[in-house]
Amino acid sequence: MATMTFADALNDAHRIEMRRDPNVFVVGEDVGIYGGIFGVTKGLLEEFGEMRVRDTPITESAFVGCAVGAAAAGLRPVAELMFVDFVGVCLDQLYNQGAKMRYMFGGKAQIPMVLRASCGAGIGAAAQHSQCLEAWFMHVPGLKVVMPSTPADAKGLLISAIRDNNPVVFLEHKILYATEGEVPEGEYTVPLGKADVKRKGEDVTVVATAAMVPKALAAADALAAEGISVEVLDPRTLLPLDEEAILASVKKTHRLVVVHEAVKFAGPGGEIAAMVAEKAFDYLDAPILRVAAPFSPVPFSPPLEQAFIPSEERISQAVREVVGA
């Protein structure tokens, strides 16, 4: 095991796949000379050259469309969208073209592309650079949606995403880029669609995503001192969603709290809660609770931004409520 930051683990995944498969290339704004605004593509230009690491103009519609076309022609592009907030200007290329081609051509076309994008609040980037929009992509048949929470998961999931023959939206919470963790050296994969229990517990299941996972784990540590045993489950992939793992955990604990940074209304937690209510209602001993952001743009003001982001204490309070503490 090596200790790596989240960003370096993603960089390692790029290198492994680009060395293994000459059809893999990277495209996007500042991915080459600058190495990506969060350092994820640093050094790739020097190793692989400008034919495989392509800096582009500020034209997301062009380079995402390029990725879709290149994937249809047999290459494996990784397109870096600086901020997921910019997806609106290239959404047609993604959801109306890339996501639908395989279906519309009866399986004869494959679109093995990855769209990487940073997401989330916490660095004072304000309303247009801080959103969590994973629910948008979850609503589109044909896409896969990934949100890792640890460096080890980030590396293994990105390798799996690059090797997948379908378009994958790979969302990286910007607060996590500098976090460190043990990462297996060399090549390995983490399967898409497979959740991970980050902490075992008996009293309540907390399903958390991305930057909410470490907060849920911290809340679980604090609640253990109160005699409350919390199981923390990270879906890792939101589409396909590992329903089996979530249901198994809820059937064991009989309670569920869903935590995400996306706004609560029509957020990803609503789908998880509805799925559990439909398939495991008789196992529940308390109502399902969601901890999420308010229905508001992300504030620029640091105190308001911190109030916007779900906190460890809000997670703890929701857990106490469902266990009747």
Image (tube, helix red, strand yellow):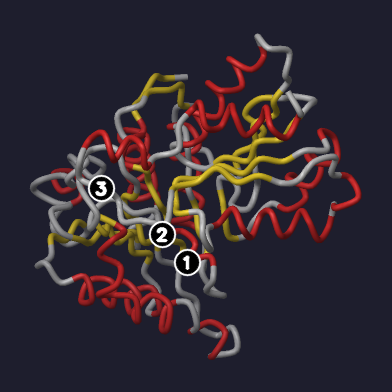
Graded by Cα atoms within 10 Å as few (under 14), some (14 to 19) or many (20 or more), the crowding at tag 1 reads many
Vertical position of residue 196 compared to residue 30: above or below: above
What residue occupies the far top of the structure in this picture?
A: 225
Q: Which residue is mark 1?
A: 137
Q: Is residue 176 left or right of residue 191?
A: left
Q: Is residue 72 left or right of residue 317?
A: left
- Across and down, in percent, residue 132 comes to 39, 53
Please give the name of the residue rendered at 41% of the width and 83% of the height, measured from the top-left corner.
97
Q: Which residue is mark 3?
A: 299
Q: Which residue is mark 2?
A: 133
Mark 2: which amino acid? Leu
Mark 1: which amino acid? Phe
Q: Is residue 225 left or right of residue 88?
A: right
Report the Cα–Cα distance between label 3 and label 1.
23 Å
- Across and down, in percent, residue 282 comes to 91, 50
Please state which of the two labelled residues, at mark 2 or mark 1, is closer to the viewer: 2
Please give the name of the residue rendered at 66% of the width and 31% of the height, measured from the top-left corner.
319
Mark 3: which amino acid? Pro
In what element is the residue under mark 2?
A: loop
In what element is the residue under mark 3?
A: loop
Q: Quadrant of residue 81?
A: bottom left
- Across and down, in percent, residue 29 comes to 15, 59
Report the Cα–Cα distance between label 2 and label 1.
7 Å
Q: Quadrant of residue 206?
A: top right
Report the Cα–Cα distance between label 2 and label 3.
16 Å
Q: Mark 3 touching mark 1, by CB under 8 A? A: no
